[in-house]
Amino acid sequence: MKVYKFKCKDCGAKKYEKIDNFDDILNSYNNLYERLYPLLELYYNVITNELPNLIRYLNAMNMIEYFSREFDNDKATSLTIQDKPNKKNKGAEFVYRVKSLIQNVNEVFSFTSRDIDIISEKVKAGRTYYVHYVENGKALDYDELFDLYNFIEDIILLNVYKLVGLDISKYEYITYLDFFIVKEICYSLKNI
């Protein structure tokens, strides 16, 4: 089991006074609240309860599905069609939902396209295994589950921040986990 040491006490918590255009962000959030509520409920559930890694991972998969369908469906569908032009069903595939959400916030991570593809495939393979228990899925070990659900929760939060108008490139510790730790997790994801 990995042990992570955090560099800062607040690990990304921002005082609203330090956020540019806070009133606009708050108005945007209030306008989107009804649509965001199911996602916020999932997120609140995982951070307020000590859930096993697998349950937290499956909740992260639900967050991907919901956010992507509600706010990012066109881009995820476009990525699917671009990569699979002869696909009969023109809906977005899960791996492209993950890929799109990572691309949306990649200014925080600076992944290469290959990195994003590898991470997206890893998330998809784990989801396929734990949701469907079929051969084309892959069971994840304890560290992989931990790394992936934390990473996905950060990806979702960053997408929400961006959706409501927060400039995610301006803040050093924008993710829930300390930025250094997130970079370390992302490095381990690419090398699994």
Image (tube, rainbow, N blue to C red):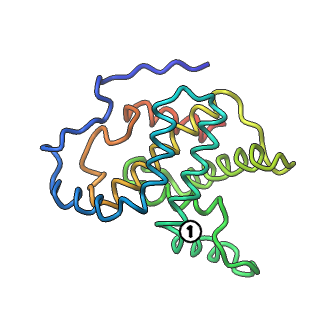
Left or right: 23 with respect to 56? left
What residue lies at 37% left-to-right and 35% top-to-bottom? Answer: 179
Q: Residues within 10 Å of mark 1 (few under 14, many from 20)?
A: many
Residue at the far right: name it.
135
For the N terminus, the quadrant is top right
**Quarter location, residue 114:** bottom right
Residue 123: % across, % down: 64, 47
Q: Helix or strand or loop: what does disc 1 sit on? A: helix
Residue 98: % across, % down: 57, 56
For the C terminus, the quadrant is top right
Amino acid bearing label 1: Ala
What residue lies at 26% left-to-right and 55% top-to-bottom? Answer: 167
Residue 53: % across, % down: 62, 30
**Quarter location, residue 95:** bottom right
Left or right: 83 with respect to 12? right
Residue 41: % across, % down: 47, 46
Choose between 115 and 10: the one closer to the eye.
Answer: 10
Choose between 173 and 110: the one closer to the eye.
Answer: 173
What residue lies at 63% left-to-right and 50% top-to-bottom? Answer: 118
Figure check: 100 above or below 181: below
Figure check: 162 above or below 186: below
Choose between 5 and 150: the one closer to the eye.
Answer: 150
Residue position marked by numbered label 1 in the rendering: 76
What residue lies at 29% left-to-right and 51% top-to-bottom? Answer: 169
